[in-house]
Amino acid sequence: MKQNTKFLWMYIGILFSFALILIIFAGMSRNTDTEQKEGLKADIAALSTQNTALLTENSNLKAQIDALIAENELLKASDAAFAEAEILLASACEAYDRGDKKASKEILAAIDTANLTQSQLYIYDMLTN
């Protein structure tokens, strides 16, 4: 029985020592209200600065997106013009191969040479000469 009470007193001593150490650490690390307020103000200022930077970056990215969308639309229109010129050149080649040079020249008159690629322009020049 004496051995059990000895262990019980050791256990109680260890628990109270540990509790005392925790209380001392808590008391030493306690922040005052002014320290907490200053810390919160600093955090708010940092977040505000970061928020402003992110808003600026967001608006720049939106401007880039709008520019890329406009460029995409121009490329789609250009691609459509190339495809239309390709179809007209193919029709003009078929008419030229059949020997109908007049029909070929009429088809070629509808083509805008500014929208032709180098290879299309070469075929256009061959058919017009």
Image: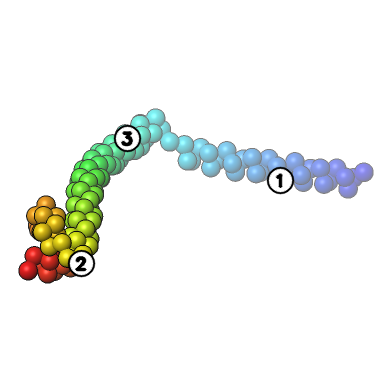
Q: Is residue 121 above or below residue 12?
A: below
Residue at 60% x, 43% y is 21
Q: Which tag is nearer the camera, tag 1 or tag 3? A: 3
How many residues crowd around disc 3 within 10 Å: few (fewer than 14), some, or many (20 or more)?
Answer: few
Nearest to the observer: residue 77 or residue 90? 90
Q: Which tag is nearer the camera, tag 1 or tag 2? A: 2
Q: Residue flagged by tag 1: what amino acid is it?
A: Ile
Q: Quadrant of residue 109?
A: bottom left
Q: Which mark is residue 44?
A: 3
Judging by the rendered image, the residue that carries numbered circle 1 is: 14
| Location of residue 91 in the rendering, given as x and y in whole percent from the top left corner | 21, 58
Q: Is residue 25 visible?
A: yes
Q: Quadrant of residue 119?
A: bottom left
Q: Residue flagged by tag 3: what amino acid is it?
A: Ile
SS class, disc 1: helix
Q: Is residue 103 above or below residue 53?
A: below
Q: Gap between marks 3 and 2, in whole Å?
A: 78 Å
Judging by the rendered image, the residue that carries numbered circle 2 is: 97
Nearest to the observer: residue 48 or residue 94? 94
Q: Is residue 123 left or right of residue 58?
A: left
SS class, disc 3: helix
SS class, disc 2: helix
| Location of residue 44 in the rendering, given as x and y in whole percent from the top left corner | 32, 35
Q: Is residue 89 visible?
A: no
Residue at 39% x, 30% y is 33
Residue at 15% x, 61% y is 100
Q: Gap between marks 1 and 3, in whole Å?
A: 43 Å
